[in-house]
Image (cartoon, rainbow, N blue to C red):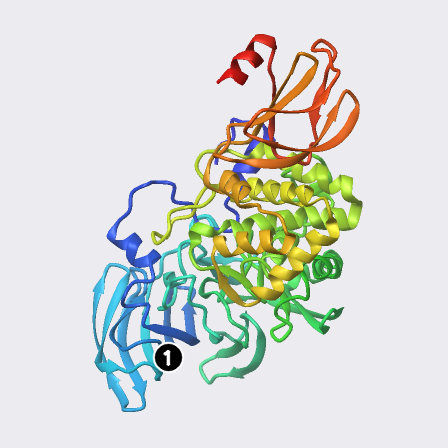
Amino acid sequence: MRYCFPLIVLCALQARTVHAQPLKHDHGSTHADTLRGSNGPFRAWWDVTHYDITIRPEFATKSIEGTTRITFRTLSPGRKMQIDLQQPLELRSVSLRAAMGESDLHYTRDGNVAWVDLPQEMAAGTSAQLVLRYGGIPREARNPPWDGGWIWKRDPQGNPWMSAACQGLGASVWYPCKDIQSDEPDSAAMHIITPDTLQAVGNGRLRNMVKNADGTSTWTWAVVDPINNYDLIPAIGKYAHIHEVYPGEDGPLDCDYWVLAANEAKAREHFKEVPRMLKCFEHWFGPYPFYADGYKLVEAPELGMEHQSAIAYGNHFKNGYLGTDLSGTGWGLKWDYIIIHESAHEWFGNSITTADIADMWVHEGFADYAETIYTQCQYGESAGDDYVIGLRKNIENDIPIIGRYGMNQEGSIDMYYKGANMIHTIRHVMANDSLFREVLRGMNLKFRHGIVTSAEVEQFISDRSGQDFSKLFQQYLRTTEVPELQWGIRKGRLMVRWDNCVESFAMPIRITVNGEERTVTISTAWSSPASGLHPKTASLLPDRNWYVGVEQLSGKELKRAIKR
């Protein structure tokens, strides 16, 4: 973290990776990157249908012991399996439970991968279960969520406070799994063993809590909806429980808040924002995607993360991002950044999930733009416009937003602020908020609980809106260049074109020429949408809601540019 820059720059640096481990911007790749990031031959033939995880952390030794049961079905014949478990955790044993009986399996380690050999090839269309026992001292999170792993802390009252943060780093940092985003289990269960003086919280709904004879308790939580493996996270602490019911589009929605006991009164007041958020987001995005598993905020020993149906909350009951406004406009201090942004991920990221993290703009761009939509819901359209435009100062345009496929490599951090401004631009190109809302709700209906690619999302937006946005997506997602509106006056005529653009780029834009507003479609070829202008008195301003640059060319510059 750098402290020598103005506050807003510091805020941008601090916030830009709030939801993930440090991004990989190098252009090299390793054997480990390929194993982790690609759906290789020892992953592709089998599909995870259920995770059942038993985990027992030992606070004093910073160690864990656990068992993961992976129920899977075969998509094609196969015998060798890739299982991910990050060092220094040790894999104790692997066994297979299948129709032919139960057998211990041979496996070898290859860095963070275990190669598991089945006793014989499994035919397509069969189901079985792997049982993996493991343990040791997991990687410790030094600065979660940016530098992730297992979190060992004490709350202000001195009670143990434990959890994990693993987006980007991978769920295999704390349990063995098929650690690729494209394969979500259809459901999952977690059994958390903890001292009976503490409470354990997991995703979904609490199935039961059993007190054990050794002074511990086992808390069993389960989700019945598909879930990202990095979203499965236990949280253990001295918690108080708050419950309310929200009357949502799909009926009563259980909302639960697990906060440190000392913060219960503060949380009851601060979390009144949740129903307002749900009303706004259900209106724009469609019903909350996980009614069966409920909505939950869990106070966590980290800033925040979009853990499905158990969102990690660590914003200290402040508005803004730890009390600051990332937009610099003041509107970001009107609401709690973690509640709004992380909850938006229930729609974009948790329900709609990209197959490869190279396409993570679909998660982060839409979640970031949800902040603008929420601001508009509460304070009006102009306030939302101010907010998203204010975020532009944080855009770096360093590398493309889309990363390298199959390499566990995200693109630029611009997926947040530039992604949001791209969506804002698309919204204004549509020039029809009813249509824009229909596109957002349609996305969440078509891709609900699904795995997608950027290309599929891009095509859906073009198809549903009836406008071809392919060149716009290519420009903003796959290049670092911002379209520049060049203009000048030649022989009394206004001349305009887009520069700094991909080939054949064209986009409608609202402009104000000498005080008169009009919408024109501009391409990379020069065109003249107005005449009767004098070069010394003419003015042109692009609408601020388009994320573009503008350059006025003088007579000689314009003449040379037109001739090129």
Classify 246 as above or below 127. above
| Residue 487 seen by the camera | yes
- The percent coordinates of residue 491 (x first, y second) are 67, 11
Residue located at (42% from left, 67% from top): 183
Q: Is residue 25 above or below residue 251?
A: above
When asked about the image quadrant of residue 133, the answer is bottom left
Residue type, mark 1 in image? Arg
Judging depth in this view, the residue of 72 and 198 nearest the camera is 72
Residue 27 vertical placement versus 119 (above, below): above
Few, some or many C-alpha atoms within 10 Å of disc 1 (few <14, some 14-19, many ≥20)? many
Using the image as rendered, state which of residue 425 and residue 22 is in the foreground. Answer: 425
Name the residue nearer the viewer: 97 or 283: 283
Q: How many numbered tags mark residues here?
A: 1
The x, y position of residue 95, in whole percent, is 28, 81
| Residue 514 % position (x, y) | 77, 20
Mark 1 secondary-structure assignment: strand
Identify the residue at horizontal 38%, vertical 76% (top origin): 70
In this rendering, the answer to whether 322 lies above or below 350 is: above
In the image, taking residue 30 as reference, residue 382 lies left or right, namely right
Name the residue: 50% across, 68% down. Answer: 227
Report which residue position mark 1 lands on: 73
Is 22 positioned to the left or the right of 389 in the image?
left
Is there any visible trace of residue 198 in the rendered image? no
477 or 263: nearer the viewer: 477
The location of residue 235, given as percent across then percent down, is 52, 65
